[in-house]
Amino acid sequence: MWKRAAAGVLGAMSVINALVIWADGQRWYDTVPGVAFTGPYNPHFVQDIGAAFFAAGLGLVARVWRVRYWPAAVAGAGFLAIHAAIHVGMLIGAMLGICTARTWGFDIAAVIIPAALSLYVAFPGKGESHA
């Protein structure tokens, strides 16, 4: 049961992030630590990022609604995990002096940990029906 609740919270966080991106992409771009390091603001690209977070969040929330929708949660968590892997690569690059300094605390707390947790809670737990 706790996995479903965690999937709901993590899914809601992704959906809220998407809604914030869509409501004011420029402000999101300017205020989220590290985003400005990626290049100049591109409204279309930022809206696409919002779409990815929205779809990921819906997948996780679907697992709360019906356990049998866990594959949708895995797909949503898959995006978050790939996104987190990119951040891990950038952190390693920053450690090696290959790329720009990163916002370590933010990357770990807001990207890497939620993605890892999302991937874990997306799959049914013991006692939950897989069908």
Image: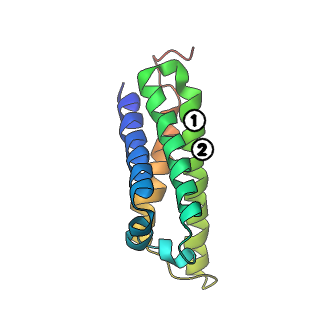
Q: Residue at x 40, y 66 (%)?
A: 106
Q: Nearer the viewer, residue 17 or 46?
A: 46
Q: Pointer 1 and pointer 2: residues touching (CB < 8 Å)?
A: yes
Q: Nearer the viewer, residue 51 or 115?
A: 51
In the rendered view, tell whether residue 28 sits above or below residue 54. Answer: below
The image shows a total of numbered marks equal to 2
**Amino acid type of the residue tagged 1 in the rendering:** Val
In the rendered view, tell whether residue 52 sits above or below residue 75. Answer: below
Q: Residue at x 45, y 44 (%)?
A: 117
Spatial separation of the CA atoms under disc 1 and disc 2 = 6 Å
Query: Secondary structure under badge 1?
Result: helix
**Residue indicated by mark 1:** 74
**Quarter of the image holding residue 86?**
bottom right
Q: Position of residue 95 (x, y in %)?
A: 56, 79
Quarter of the image where the N terminus is located: top left
**Residue indicated by mark 2:** 78
Q: Position of residue 98 (x, y in %)?
A: 64, 83
Q: Residue furthest bottom?
A: 97
Quarter of the image where the C terminus is located: top right
